[in-house]
Amino acid sequence: PTQSLQVEVDGNVIDANKTIVRRYYEEVIGNPAVADELFAADHVHYPGLTPGPDGVKQLIRMAKSKFGNDMSYILDHLIAVVDLVAADFTLSGQGAYTREMCMFRVVDGKIVARSCVYCDPPPGSRLCY
């Protein structure tokens, strides 16, 4: 038998979690120091990167090496349920273009986990197959 879980959540918490994730896309690229405010100390972006905000800064440097200092994000969708926030976005720069979908977990105002899938669409398309 399937059991349903009912959770009461203040809508302000969901909005606050979305704001934290939105700040990641809107602020961290231009000012990686903002990662110190947004990410938990034990957060791991990808294996091999330093945990916490310093790993996020490493990731931004790696992305800039591929997409250039003028890289930009277009946040297409941002959806939140309780402590999970899903982001669908486009990253571009230097003629490169990537679509990503990431799931963030936000606890006590900090991003504690992030999992992403991405694809490089064919030239001239925003769709991945």
Image (cartoon, rainbow, N blue to C red):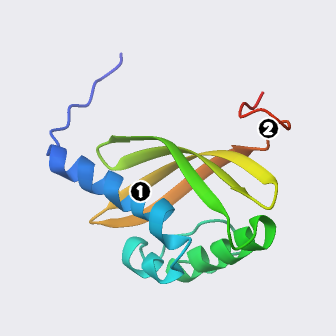
- Residue 14 is situated, as x and y percent measured from the top left of the image, at 25, 47
Q: Residue at x 66, y 53 (%)?
A: 91
Q: Is residue 35 left or right of residue 69?
A: left
Disc number placed over residue 9 in the picture, else none: none
Q: Residues within 10 Å of mark 2 (few under 14, many from 20)?
A: some
Q: Which residue is more in the foreground, 50 or 14? A: 14
Residue drawn at (32%, 61%) of the image: 107
Please give the residue where the numbered disc 1 appears in the rendered image: 22
Residue picked out by circle 2: 121
Q: Is residue 67 left or right of residue 22?
A: right
Q: Amino acid at mark 1?
A: Arg
Compared with 45, 120 (above or below) is above
Name which residue lies at 73% across and 48% down: 98
Is residue 101 depicted above or below 125 in this figure? below
Is residue 71 positioned above or below 116 on the image?
below
Q: Quick one: quadrant of the C terminus?
A: top right
Q: Position of residue 89 (x, y in %)?
A: 57, 46
- Number of callouts: 2
Amino acid residing under circle 2: Pro
Is residue 86 rendered to the left or right of residue 57?
Answer: left
Q: Is residue 90 left or right of residue 109?
A: right
Q: Earlier in the sequence, mark 2 or mark 1?
A: 1
User: Is there any visible trace of residue 110 in the rendered image?
Assistant: yes
Q: Residues within 10 Å of mark 1 (few under 14, many from 20)?
A: some
Is 97 located above or below residue 63 in the figure? Answer: above
Residue 13 horizontal/vertical position (percent): 21, 52
Q: Secondary structure at mark 2?
A: loop
Q: Give residue 121's position: percent from left, percent from top.
A: 79, 38
> What's the residue at 48%, 75% (across, down)?
42
